[in-house]
Amino acid sequence: MTPTLSLQGRTALITGAATGIGRATALLFAQAGARVVVNHLGQDAEAASLVQAIQALGGEAIEISADVGQAAEVQRLVDGAIAAVGAIDVLVNNAGIIQEKAFLDTTEADWDRLLGTDLKSVFLVCRAVLPGMVARGGGAIVNIASDLGILGRERYAPYCAAKAGVIGLTRSLAREFAPQQVRINAIAPGPVATAMVSLEHMSAEWVEKELAIPQHRLGEPEEIAASALFLASDLSRFYTGQVLGPNGGSVMT
């Protein structure tokens, strides 16, 4: 059978899906035929709007609010998703936060909050979802990292450390679960036009520096979603442990 981008008949859980890259990914996966579980944390209006948009396209979606940095919340999320729409075939670990702060001003609470959301959550959700994928003989996991997990950046130490950790975790899990036909890959986007790359979360200096890449522009969430769809689909069935870089040239490997 010729592989395609179709996700028809599959269920996809996307964390941090109410806005930004997560929202774009949920919409694209629904268009590809997936049943979508929209995870969010207290973004009820945005999540409901997304579910309605997917349903308007003829797709199927539900939303579940849960803090993916907490083990009990993750188990509730996964159990609720399976009860509502069936076994999880595709997982996209997208939930993330960012903070600009000088390293010597960074508190232990800052560190724990960033690492909890950006790295621990990936561990927790993978741990909750992988047993089912192994039992069914396969699945696909896509972890959203960042080019800053490769490059590093001053004033963003916890974020850079967390995203580097996501890449390392992805490669470790890919090796461990390849024999069970679970493919685990990552995406390390460059700067993307979301709330995280805005004056809400970055100084004007760093917003300007984000554009200092070869393509001289921000990426669109839909461009990152396209990479996620490829990695979730059968077109990437010989990919595991890889890090795709839709980044406008910020990292060239």
Image (cartoon, helix red, strand yellow):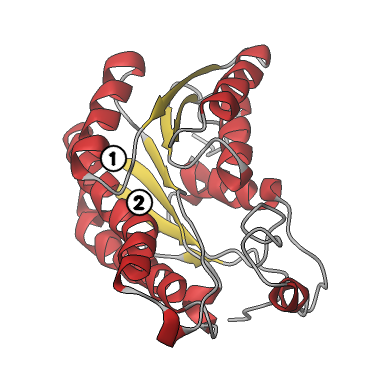
Amino acid identity at mark 1: Gly
Amino acid identity at mark 2: Arg
Residue 78 drawn at (x, y percent): 27, 31
Q: Using the image as rendered, state which of residue 80 and residue 202 is in the foreground.
A: 202
155 sits left or right of 248 in the view: left
Question: What residue is at 28 percent from the left and 40 percent from the top?
Answer: 138
- Disc 1, SS: loop
Q: Using the image as rendered, state which of residue 79 and residue 185 is in the foreground.
A: 79
Question: What residue is at 43 percent from the left and 37 percent from the top?
Answer: 41
The quarter in which the C terminus is drawn is: bottom right
Task: Provide the residue designation for mark 2.
Answer: 183
Image quadrant where residue 108 sits? bottom left
Farthest right residue in view: 216
Task: Provide the residue designation for mark 1.
Answer: 138
Can residue 181 be seen?
no
Q: Using the image as rendered, state which of residue 101 and residue 6 is in the foreground.
A: 101
88 sits left or right of 180 in the view: right
Q: Is the Cβ of the residue at disc 1 closer than 8 Å to that at disc 2? A: yes
Pointer 1 or 2: first along the chain: 1
Q: Residues within 10 Å of mark 1 (few under 14, many from 20)?
A: some
Question: What residue is at 78 percent from the left and 75 percent from the top?
Answer: 208
The residues tagged by marks 1 and 2 sit, at their Cα atoms, a distance apart of 8 Å
Q: Residues within 10 Å of mark 2 (few under 14, many from 20)?
A: many
Image quadrant where residue 242 sits? bottom left
Question: What residue is at 35 percent from the left and 51 percent from the top?
Answer: 183
Can residue 225 be seen?
yes
186 sits left or right of 151 in the view: left
166 up-or-down from 232: above or below: below
Image quadrant where residue 168 sits? bottom left
Residue 147 drawn at (x, y percent): 56, 72
Residue 193 drawn at (x, y percent): 72, 55
Image disc number at residue 157: none
